[in-house]
Amino acid sequence: MSVLKQKEFAIILFVVPLLFILFNFYTGIAGPQATELINWGAYLWNFSMIIGTYSMFRKHLLTITERQKDWPYSVIMFVSFFVYFITGYIHTPTFQWIMDYVQTPIMMTIWVGAFTTFTMVFRGARTRNWLGVLLLLSTVLTVLRMAPIGEAIWGGFPIIGLWINDVPNVAVMRAITIGMGIGLLATMTREILGKETHYLGE
Amino acid sequence: MSDFIGSLVFVSIILIIWTIFYRENPFYKAISSMSVGLMLAFWLKGGLDTLYKDVIKPAMGLEPARLAVLIIGLFIFMRFYSDLEFVSKWPIAILAGVGTAIASKGAVSAMILSQIAAGSFVGADLLTNINNLLIWIGTIATTVYFLFSFERGPILGTVSKVGQVYMMLAFGVVFGMSVYGSSVLTQMTYLLDYPGYIATAVAILVIIADIVLRMRRKAPESS
Amino acid sequence: MSGKKWYHLSMDAQDSLVYLFVILLCGVPVIRPLGLPLAINESTTHFYETLNNIPEGSTILWNEGYMVQSYVSGSEIAFYRLFFDLMRENDVKVIFVSSCVDGPLGGAMIQKMLDAGVDKTDTVYGRDYVNLGWLPGFEAVLAAIAQDIQSVTEEDAYGTPVSDIEMMQGLTTDDLYLLGFSCGVSVDPWMRQWGPLGKPILMVGGESLIAQAMGYINAGTVEAYLNGGRGMAEFEKVYGFYTLQTAIMDSVNLMSLYGIALIILSNVLFGKKKG
Amino acid sequence: MILEGLRFDLIILLVNVALIYFFMRKAEGGKLPYIRPVPFIEELDSIVGRAAEMGRPIHFSTGYGGLHDEWAVMCVAGLALLSKVAELCGKYRVWLQFTCFRGYLVPIGQDLLKTGYEKGGNPDMYSPDMVSYVGEDQTAYVAFIMDYFMSERPAVAMMFGAIQAEMNHHLMMSARVGAVCCAGTPRLYYQGKMALMADFALLGEELYVAGASITKDPVHMGSIEAEDWSKIIVLALLLIAAIAVNIGMPQLFTGLMGW
């Protein structure tokens, strides 16, 4: 029993599926079993999500019972959760109504995508050195390439903009992609050798 | 009828969330905590439906593999029994193992090898040759910039500087694209459409009233 | 307000003004569209031709994962309609599946497109197209698709077991002629899982995701792509079916100029403060 | 045995694995490699010190990616930085708020923070409420971050790891609240915004290097040196492929890949 308690056993549970899937990828042997293991990744992720939801409920329940700061908002959170979750199974038209007219505007608007970009541009587009100037120049040229008005102002913008996208951008994205690929392999190796076990919470 | 109310709710939610740009207010906090509840329910329902469909139903049919993953999945709830706490780490270990394997198996061919297949600088027309040459130089310079365990001498220093110039141009493209694309426009069409503009008009009045109130409250203090 | 000039607004007030202008500039074209001509990029026409050149009777897979805007504004309707045209003309079969990071909204997007967006005359569910709905696990689902299409899920979005669906009988991943996806996040997972298959891949992504994926596009892993909102508006023009996306292109012009003006303004202010 | 077209693929994988194993063994044997200094790590002490003077909390987040997906790599480096910042916060008695996105990061975060505050010398200051989790969805996560910045007005805002769109809100709210903004992610999409906006930006793999130079962990230091040599091999392949194509042997490299 004590063997199971050891950290090493959990590392074995990490390494064995990993090596098995790689073995199948390179040799094509035991395909169905590898597929099953890949699907296990998705199913176990569901269970870990349930744990995350439970620990979040415990926190909000604590906020309510002890009347901590902002406890009415936790009540709103619970009410909206139960209403939405239960109608999902009992009364689908209401679920669909909530999805169309309540959840979608929240998901679309809470992003405030444009606003964050414009505040960032207003607050942060400060060029600290000549490299910053280069970055902003390339930003402006790309914006003028993409917006139809850029072409209306001067025919050259789309050509320059496209060149910046097709040459320097390709070169840098290629180098960074290679770097990320190598980084991924390095981490996989460290995890196989058991040197990195943050997934166990150390 | 439900569309009319629905559109009004749709637009008023957008307006309530936009009030955060005016100033912090309880309505925004209410919507944000409601979004927490709705998202949790949404994800949980999606997850549970799939779990039932792909794991619980086959496990009932005594399909061995799905029965095994159901049991291992339930181990995760052992976290709350202190003596069995180590068992709860097993599903997370398998999960992380499969996740890393999936990512690494495709990494070599898609992220490394297919990127190395360089374009040729001979034949074809002159422009593509120059462009391919510039891409090739840029890739090498940027990769040299990301070498960390070498002293940056004069040669490596200048090559890294060339890499930095390339990177600034490339990051400018990525940043420019995000400045260009935005989702506000979709919302605007709903705000100015049939039922929506009623709520928009009301919102504008509320904000103006709030500004006037706060100006009057500030005015007596300073005079 | 002694000593403080009227334009020395608080930081919050300045930001509110910036946002007010964003809202106003977005509103103007909705009321009075500019109607500037939209040039068609070569990548969009290549995307259109690739879809049209799909051989008779082959099966393709579409992985839906675009952002929530497309659920509301239906910006993807154009190529969904083209899928159904291909079903009628070339007897092409399409598998719709979503593993998008926005959660079950991916399944809702496909469902909304199938209900209201497309023209389903004489196409039969189960024979011409199948909807597997939303599946959790993101890259794990992409890996399962690449490994074996039959194992992706037990039942489709409506509860019928995959083994009973006519077009899925005996279908393997190798039979899939083409894989397409729309993404709201970076494209590396799709490239890693589908790249090694060597099949043509179609991509629809947000503008800056495309800029980031230029390495893969230049290397040929991606066959053709639509460049975000603008790409979809161009595709609508090529295909000849217009939605909100084309109207949005007008407002984008003003927003872009506004963005550039802000860049210049913030640098001038920063220069003055530093000077 | 090995499938057609994957043999060269496997060779590259095994070469990388061998390099990492060799350099890790070398580093663990005591010969730590020379790592170019990362400016952000030197400043970390003064950043936390400034937060202590202003008496306002530090907000830390590892962003959207967790330990179960291919972003585990970045989240791990983010957690390494978190443990160092927690130690410094323990030393300077600063409240460190860690917002995590995945359920399983809550226990991991609490463990890291507790050990950090103990090492810093103020174990009494640690409380489990320092770790906040608002569900698996980005929308709620982003809403929480905006709420937190508006109400708590942190002195320093740090975001390291696999960050998605919440980088926008992080940069925006840091600029609005006037917090010292530190950000680092290897994800391509945000390099431009970070390079322009953040006071301290870790571009590309610098996040991994920062994580390693903090922990001085021979494993990470060794693998950074190994990765450098892998990049040099890739540069060599790039050179050979380009030369081969241009002296009239275009089949050399593509043939090798299809072998």
Image (cartoon, rainbow, N blue to C red):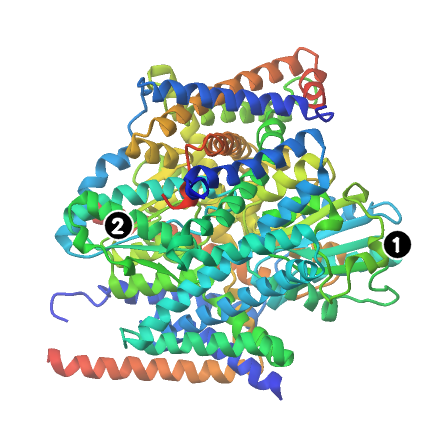
* Percent of width and height locating residue A174: 54, 31
Give the Cα separation between the discs numbered 1 and 2: 62 Å
Residue B108 in view (yes/no): yes
Left/right placement of residue D13 relative to residue A139 reads right
Report crowding for label 1: few under 14, some 14 to 19, many 20 or more residues within 10 A (C-alpha).
Answer: some
- Between C204 and A24, which is closer to the camera in this rendering? A24
Task: Check the residue under mark 2 and report the chain it is in.
Answer: D
Residue drawn at the location 45% of the way across and 31% of the way down: A190
Residue placed under numbered mark 1 in the picture: C91
Q: Describe the element under mark 2 as helix, strand or loop.
A: helix
- The quadrant in which residue D120 appears is top left
Q: Amino acid at mark 2?
A: Lys
- The quadrant in which residue C87 appears is bottom right
State which quarter of the image contains the N terminus of chain B. bottom right
* Percent of width and height locating residue D98: 32, 54
* Percent of width and height locating residue B116: 59, 25
Task: Check the residue under mark 1 and report the chain it is in.
Answer: C
- Between B207 and A23, which is closer to the camera in this rendering? A23
Q: Nearer the viewer, mark 1 or mark 2?
A: 2
* Percent of width and height locating residue A21: 62, 37
Pick out the residue farthest to the front.
Answer: A1
Residue placed under numbered mark 2 in the picture: D114
When the figure is inspected, residue B152 is found, relative to residue C72, above or below; the finding is: above
Q: Amino acid at mark 1?
A: Asp
- Between C167 and B14, which is closer to the camera in this rendering? C167
